[in-house]
Amino acid sequence: MIPEKWVVKVTEKNTDIINAWKQKSNYKDEAKKYEYVSYDGCGCSSLALKWHIEISFDQFQQHILNKNNMQKEIIGYLCPQDLFNGCIKAGSLYVKAKGNAANGAYIYNNDSTSSIPKEIVEQWKPVYTQDELKVGDWVITTQEDFNMYNKYSKGELFKVTKVSNEYVYYEENSSVLKHRIRKATKEEVKNYLLNEAGKLGFIHGVKCLDSFIGLPTTIYEDKWATIVPQKEVVKITCSNNRDIEVEVTTDGIKYDGTTLSIKVIQEILNFTTTVNGWAVVPEMFSIGCREGIDRDDLQKVLDVYNKLNK
């Protein structure tokens, strides 16, 4: 429990969080102006310690920001940004490392090389033991289990289809004990679905049944639809000096509502003939009613197509 009249120290790292809470009190000025903020939202100096008891920022998060979580255990903290050159994504869960050599540090996914001191991690947003699981929740395994009924590794993610007293179920009849899982974070679900979509040949920026996904939007439902081809417009100049625009996509080439196979362009560029023993390579072409199309322009179309399909 915390004292009735408390103060929390304002630091560069926690000022935004404390200030967001402070703005809901009767004192609307910025928290960064003060050394401490008190239980009623009033900013103050260290002199307030004569009449108030200082609490840690961790206590502030647990008991003030998360009153509904007062009886829950913190299982880890969410990193606020990408770490280690993007190898660990924002929103990933850091948990306390085990063993005498850990010194209270936190790690990601049981990887000791990701270790970060507790003084840093415990300033992040905490994750508490979850509420009762329900059908439709996304969960992630915290332990591995290999037996005749279940086979899963630590870190596997799935959607709950049924819940009993001791087990949660996924897929058809597969199950896992509740103490071997936790609720997955939104970032973990997003990364999982993007990865699964990639296995099926989808690219980033795919259509969901109800929205276009650039990245952060509502991506947490597994309702993947059609691939959205990447595209680029290439200008081609004809002999009458009229420019035409050709849309090059990962599917092919589109012009005037018609989709052409890339094989057509390849065959045109590969065409050669022989005249009196001399090999002749055309430098200009007529395609349909478009005359005087330069070889270099057709090659540009082919190059763009190959770039999009790398």
Image (cartoon, rainbow, N blue to C red):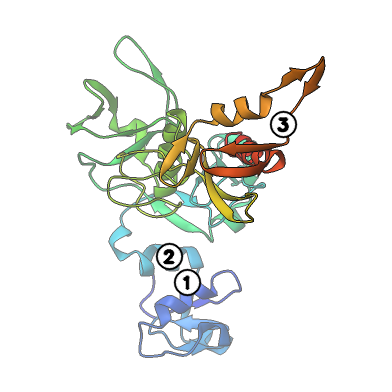
Q: Residue placed farthest to the front in the image?
A: 276
Distance (Cα) linking label 1 and label 2: 9 Å
Q: Do the residues labelled 3 and 2 touch (CB within 8 Å)?
A: no
Residue behind mark 2 = 61
Residue behind mark 3 = 282
Q: Do the residues labelled 1 and 2 touch (CB within 8 Å)?
A: yes
From what the image shows, is residue 50 above or below residue 300? below
- Where disc 2 sits, the SS reads helix
Front one among 194 and 109 = 194
Q: Which residue is rendered at x = 77% and y = 19% of the image?
A: 275
**Residue 99 visible, this angle:** no
From what the image shows, is residue 298 above or below residue 201? below
**x%, y% of residue 228?**
42, 43
| Direction from residue 92 to residue 118 in the image, left or right | right
Front one among 29 and 81 = 81
Residue behind mark 1 = 17
